[in-house]
Amino acid sequence: MGFLQRHHLLLLVLVHSILFLSYQVQSLDEKQNLLQGLNSYRASLNLSALTENSNADCFADELASQFKNQPCSNTTGADTVPGTEPQLSNYPDLLAKCQLNITDTRDGALMPVCVPNLDPDLVLTNYTETQYTQYLNESTYIGAGIGAEGNWMVVVLSTNTMGGAFTPAVNVASLFFDVGLAQNLMPLLLVFILVLLS
Ligand SMILES: *[C@@H]1O[C@H](CO)[C@@H](O)[C@H](O)[C@H]1NC(C)=O
Ligand SMILES: *[C@@H]1O[C@H](CO)[C@@H](O)[C@H](O)[C@H]1NC(C)=O
Ligand SMILES: *[C@@H]1O[C@H](CO)[C@@H](O)[C@H](O)[C@H]1NC(C)=O
Ligand SMILES: *[C@@H]1O[C@H](CO)[C@@H](O)[C@H](O)[C@H]1NC(C)=O
Ligand SMILES: *[C@@H]1O[C@H](CO)[C@@H](O)[C@H](O)[C@H]1NC(C)=O
């Protein structure tokens, strides 16, 4: 490869890195804003602030990237109509990517919303003025992870109980080789469906 091509390649990589970084920063801002908004809402109900849970964060990101290609409609996100919830068959893979174990996540609440361009005010009210309030209104949830991709934002709430702390599994490999995987997955899928149903 000649010097000029390599030079161009480097420049291209640099430009992409800068774009990627600025996108990351912007997305970080969106998440921080939302967390602040959710915590103001919690404060107005005299509930403790949600603290950032990095494993829930990771899982929220994985979920958001699953949703990102779906267009917003009046039947997605916070407006999901009972019986039409998205079924994510690759849950085990998504959990594994975050070194999570189903037994540590089944009590969590998963709350996806779809808002064009993630308008901050609409994103917040999609949590504080919809079916999701019943979860934000719960003192059992103490932590939150937030993921954003495209028009989708996903908030994952964690608890301080064994079943919802989102602490990484000690034995991640067992997630792959467990023959009873489908059975183990049911609780989380159920939570997911309940969240969307209610
Ligand atoms: C929150 O607590 C304050 C002081 O303890 C009380 O005056 C207020 O009514 C409470 N608000 C709610 C929504 O419980
Ligand atoms: C969603 O929007 C369509 C039209 O775009 C309308 O026919 C339908 O009734 C709406 N559904 C709900 C649940 O609002
Ligand atoms: C939720 O977001 C949608 C945009 O996808 C918006 O039309 C709707 O008004 C929002 N709902 C609330 C309660 O803010
Ligand atoms: C939150 O929960 C409390 C007690 O369960 C209830 O009195 C209150 O109306 C709820 N608030 C909202 C905004 O859902
Ligand atoms: C999750 O971890 C617990 C112990 O931390 C273990 O007993 C259980 O078998 C694990 N489950 C899966 C599906 O890996």
Image (cartoon, rainbow, N blue to C red):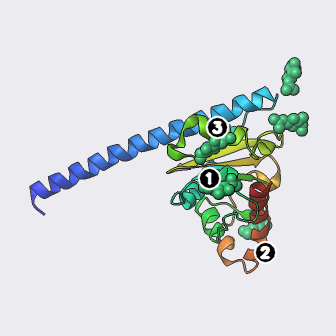
**Dot 2, crowdedness within 10 Å: few (<14), some or many (≥20)?**
few
Residue for point 68% across, 44% down: 144
Residue 184 relative to residue 4: left or right: right
Question: Residue 182 location, x and y as percent?
Answer: 74, 75
Q: Position of residue 196 (x, y in %)?
A: 74, 56
* Residue 143, placed above or below residue 69: above
Query: Element at badge 1?
Result: helix
Ligand number 5: quarter of image: bottom right
Specify which label sits upstream in the sequence, 3 or 2: 3
Tags 3 and 2 touching, CB below 8 Å: no
Q: Is residue 196 shown to the viewer in this render? A: yes
109 relative position to 22: left or right: right
Mark 3 beta carbon near ligand 3 (under 8 Å): yes
Which label is found at residue 196? none
Q: Position of residue 96 (x, y in %)?
A: 62, 65
Residue positioned 54% across, 60% down in the render: 70
Q: Mark 2 highlights which residue? A: 183
**Label whose residue precedes the other's in the sequence (3 or 1):** 1
Q: Which residue is mark 3?
A: 124
Looking at numbered disc 2 in the image, what kind of residue is underneath it?
Gln
Residue 161 or 40: which is nearer the viewer? 40
Q: Residues within 10 Å of mark 1 (few under 14, many from 20)?
A: many
- Which secondary structure, mark 3? helix
Count of marks, rendered view? 3
Q: CA distance from mark 2 to mark 1?
A: 22 Å
How far apart in space, not on screen, are marks 3 and 1 (Cα)?
16 Å
- Mark 2 CB near ligand 5 (8 Å cut): no
| Residue drawn where x is 9% and y is 60% of the image | 2
Which amino acid type is marked by label 1?
Ala
Q: Which mark is residue 60?
A: 1
Residue 176: x and y, percent? 65, 74
Q: Amino acid at mark 3?
A: Leu
